[in-house]
Amino acid sequence: MHHHIQLHELILAIVIVLILVLLLIITVLAYSFYSYRILHNRQSWRQIIEYKIMETIVGSDDSDDRDREFAEHLKEPSFRALFLDVLVDSDRKFSGGAKQSINRLFHDFKLEDEAWRKLRHRRAYLVAGGVQELAAMNVEQAIPEITDKLNDPRTAVYQEAQYAIVSFKGYEGLGFLEYFDRPLSDWQQLRLLYSIHDIPESSDLHVDTWIKSTNDTVVVFTLRLIRKFRLMTFYTEVFHLLNHSSTKVRVQAIRTLQAIENSTTIQQFMSIFGQQPIEVQNEILKAMKVAKSRECERFLKDQLWNHTAVSIKISAAEVLVVLGEEQYLRDISQNEDTYDELIQIIKHALQEKKC
């Protein structure tokens, strides 16, 4: 009897496991089918949406049947969400009249409500999406709420808010830099720079305040801003940054000085060269390579012979090649007293010239 009960329990356990496995298989198949339908729908919906946008831009949107079909699709929340995504994506690709047509679609189909709901959601990615959509569609009424998002602790939200405010206000939107104490990523800096087309002379925002920021990434961004707009009046402030504690700031300062150079730049580079870390020294040599100034010829030869770092020797040789000193380098490489490492460095530099 005891053995019979154990066998019965075993059979029951096996049956339960088989049922669970079967349910799991059914669930996986159902989810796969659902995912396939979603993917299929998104592909077909995207074609419908893109056709609608194209018709609107070229002014041939005159089919009542197609309008009714499109209106039916809009009752589906997933379709509306995709429509909004495609509109925002299209907005980045067009300008002028086409951009205005896209903006009109946004308002005609009341997608603004969708974007506002996202802006006021709890999830970071939805809030960021709402900010992006309202900015792309130029909904100026959203500026106060988006401005509040500049202080949001979530990176995705405050970054999108920064970009949105600059998109709305241009240079004036950079006011947040004065108190911003979090990292400003390289990608975010490029997005912001791309959105700024000019610096108004009457602006109350001062670059000289940002360049003294305790936030190194704000200083780096300011240097890139100076470089983009060739703000020559900040030459002295930029040069003083070659004493900054951050090597990254110093590297950017060298690039900016090279962009706004004057008659003293090369001489200044040579005078501070020995006090700089290797990364900055290499950046100085890159600037000399671009400048092609013969006043640094003797300095370069000294670095080639006496510097302890191979990377500096290589860079110095490459700049000498650019200055037309190939024969000088060949003579050194053919001299019996020249050590092997220097010969290899020179051959590398001369080979680079041929390439």
Image (cartoon, grey):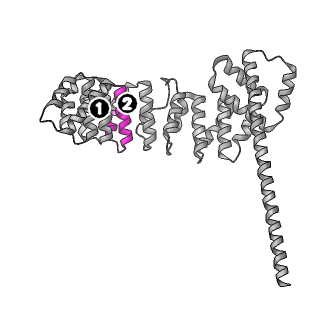
Picture disc at residue 197:
none
Tell me the residue that label 1 is attached to.
285
In the picture, the quarter occupied by the C terminus is top left
Secondary structure predominantly adopted by residues drawn in magenta: helix
User: Residue 333: x and y, percent?
Assistant: 18, 31
SS for callout 2:
helix
* Distance from the alpha carbon under mark 2 to that under mark 1: 14 Å
Towards the viewer: 304 or 288: 304
Say which residue appears at 77% left-offset and 38% top-offset: 78
Q: Nearer the viewer, residue 71 or 309?
A: 309
The amino acid type found where label 2 is placed reads Thr
Q: Is 153 situated above or below 322?
A: below
Q: What residue range appears in magenta?
A: 239-265
- Residue 191: image quadrant is top right
Q: How far from the left and from the top, in percent, is residue 217?
A: 45, 41
The quarter of the picture where the N terminus appears is bottom right
